[in-house]
Image (spheres, rainbow, N blue to C red):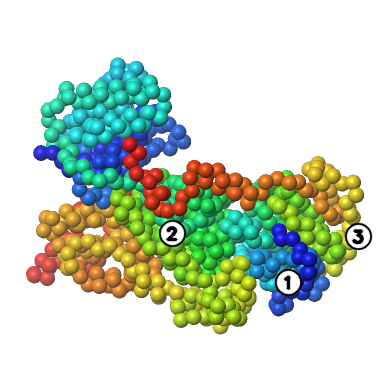
Amino acid sequence: MPTNDLTIAMVGSGGDGVVTMGDLIAQVAAREGLHAIKTEAYGPQIRGGEASCTVRIASKDIFAQGDTVDVLVVFRRADFARFRGELSVAEDAVILAEADDPTPEGEVNLTGQGGVRLVQVPFGELARDSAGTPASKNVVALGILSGLFGLPEEGLRLAVSHKFGRKKESVREANTKAFEAGVAFARSLTEGFEAKRLEYVPGEPLLLMSGNEASAVGAMHAGCRFFAGYPITPSSEILHFLAEWLPRAGGSFIQTEDELAAIGAVIGASFAGVKSMTATSGPGLSLMTEMLGLSSMAEVPTVIVDVQRGGPSTGNPTKGEQADLFQCLYGTHGDAPRVVLACGDVQDCFHATVDAFNISEEFQLPVLILSDQAVGQRKETLPASKLVHEVLDRAKPTEAQLVDYKRYADTPTGVSPMSVPGMKSGMYQTNGLEHDADGQPASAYLVHEKMNAKRYRKLWPIRDKYHSFRRYGPEEADIGIVCWGSSDGAVREAVIAANARGEKVSAFVPQILYPFPKRDFERYAASVQELLVMELSYTAQFYKYLRTFLRLPEGRTHVFKRSGGRSLSVAEVNRELRRVESIASSREMEVAI
Amino acid sequence: MSTPALVPAFQPADYKSALKPVWCAGCGDFGALAALHRAMAKLQLEPWNTVVLSGIGCSSRLPGYVETFGFNGVHGRALTLATGVKAARPELNVIAVGGDGDGIAIGGNHFLHAARRNLDIAYFLMDNEIYGLTKGQAAPTTPTGDKTKSTYWGNPEPSVDPCELAISFGATWVARGFSGDPKTLTELMTQAMQHRGFAFLNVMSPCVTWRGDDQFKILKAKLKSLPEDHDRGSRAAALAYTRETDTMTTGVLYEVREPSLVERLEGVRTKALKTGPVTSTAEVLRAFAPAF
């Protein structure tokens, strides 16, 4: 029986072109209206070195990158060994391995598991014979994948032609020949691959975009016209995109000397009236923390994307984790209100960024967007129709407010009229020092108390207006999973599968973390028997955070936490569901006895 | 920056805010503030189109004493804020002020890069060779051997000359002034605000509280004007008036015309717009549609 869901991984060295293969497969999926999620992993080398690329391609909705690999292309077994910890090969996987591999025999065993089928393929030789160069072996592999597993053949043919058509005609011709050689080779091996053959009906073309690109597009959509940033993995794609596109929209982009300058310039530009943003990762956010306080104190709209990586210090720059939560929620000196949003997938990156601008412009405070490597750097197909979001602009002070203008006037919502330079009656001093309604320094404790109250009051209307969360599964459930950010996809798939098996499992995924949608969470917690918190933080930051809002049900709250470095898998969620189930049933037995 | 109107609409007093400075009696910063009010009036800067930004320190309180838009930010970061304001709104008059600790120690990296970018602002650094607000610790400008609260046994470190740094970092207008010579200082501030590019003015501004009554006298005794034939277009000639020990030469040490940050960003936009302006999200999304 053919499949509607196939995960293909490719592993090789620099120059083997595995990332190109993945790109082309994902692009073809988008063209055919198929759903695809593409991820990449690299060794520590700056250029060259081992690389792996995984594409999950399906004719149904998918939300995670795929736990196990159905089809694996290995150009060099030694390279595969480097990714063994990250790539789980399915028990019935097909492995296409280079027949002429210099890796010593027996050093890397590809077929560790029972039903794995190993096919030796002379990739290099086929490429040499067809294209005249072994460099085209990745294109040979594409031909084989299309022939054996039903990847869109015509689409891939066009993709190859387009990719190499930008070079010399002879290069295009050679690669087309390589592709056909792969297709022909596949025909010689027709038997026994039926279960791994992708069956689909082509649909409307989709977009192919990474989470970081979606954040950048969200910023453009929201009207961001100033970006300042400092390169840091895994957030730099946001900076790359805006460096190219902001000037085309009449905006300005500056690569600053450090993250301190980045957030400073963003606060300056926003003070001057232009929607502004910066993007960074955990270590960069640490450098920005002082001026996060300034943004909060001076009440200047500021948008910061934190694409989380692993660990403190330099940590695991190329791997995701969910352990910047406390830094985003609490990272500050003094009491500094801010808003924290979370991204569960690529489209969330778009929507969270637009929301971040809408909230920061209306409520004049810093808004942090917590993305991570797993969401930021993976590419997903999605329809353009999902990227629609209302944009709000900063309110100008009214005529009445400009009479005896008070920049920090106390109001019922805590939001004061904000003028911008150029407004004749709106001149004011803004201040990182505690200040009075005029913005003049004031250190009396009553002023500080009053202004703190004013600044924090803004969080209430934000919570009323933006209490967004995702909710999966039945109204009432035996087990309810609570997670956030990039863990969304695996949890969602596990819930769908569990429900299909008749299990009563649900999930709650807040898309705003601060102010926390407390009432929604309370209602949710009351709808489940057992609560399972899942997160990629060694110290269970999210679980601890939830406890500050709610007395989680004693004895019926379970925590799954581990370090990042690898995305949460559906298998992990399933395993946890079984564990919670067995705890719950043994407790019932105790009660019965 | 804007040109003077025929009938002056603004007098120096119009730039004076209602707030009374917190500075000690006799502080050099009073002279710098008065000179700034006068220079602004000379240029007839529209107060509402002018932004004065600062970091933290005694002199960083200055934006509060000028009747314009003002931003008293955090320690060392005035130039980062100014970069954003100017890049976002090039038509505004942007002035950054602060002290030697704020600008050369904690903010030193931003000083380098604001100068390198030739950010179109005037930066007035009030140099008292000491940390005043934190009550008397050594700064990068404190002379070697001087006793301060943090150099009990005498300052063991060499000091820097901010003008020398500015010239080598790429500032396109560099001058030294003295708060005790308000006439020259007003003239220098006026020129700085007229310069297109990064104009750096080091204002020697005595601290009566932490550097003693002598500092003013010592500086005054060292005061010297640049010779008439000084070649301000020459980096080497300018550098000859830095790291002075027995003299303190005031005047415009260096002036060249190079493309400013605003002009360079405008250049980028012009180049980018040639590939087609982007006016809608749909156009951006097209970049992600299948190309074949």
Q: Chain of mark 3?
A: B
The quadrant holding residue A17 is: top left
Q: CA gap, disc 2 to disc 1?
A: 37 Å
Asked if the residue under mark 1 is in contact with the one under mark 3, i.e. CB atoms within 8 Å, the reply is no
Residue shown at 85% from the left, 55% from the top: B250
In this rendering, the answer to whether A457 lies above or below A80 is below
Few, some or many residues within 10 Å of mark 1 (<14, 14–19, 20+): many
- Cα separation between marks 3 and 1: 32 Å
Q: Is residue B112 left or right of residue A94?
A: right
Depth check: give the residue in front, A27 or A123: A27
Which three-letter amino acid code belongs to the residue tagged 1?
Tyr
Q: Nearer the viewer, residue B57 or A460?
A: A460
Residue A584, image x, y percentages: 16, 64
Element type where label 3 sits in the image:
helix
Look at mark 1 in the image and give the residue it sits on: B15
Disc 3 to disc 2: CB gap under 8 Å? no
A86 relative to A60 in the view: left or right: right
Q: Which residue is mark 2?
A: A222
Going by the numbered disc 3, the residue's amino acid type is: Ala
Q: Residue at x 18, y 55 (%)?
A: A496
How many other residues sit within 10 Å of disc 2, few (<14), some (14-19) or many (≥20)? many
- Quadrant location, the C terminus of chain B: top left
The mark nearer the N terminus, 3 or 1, is 1
Name the mark on residue B204: none
- Residue indicated by mark 3: B221
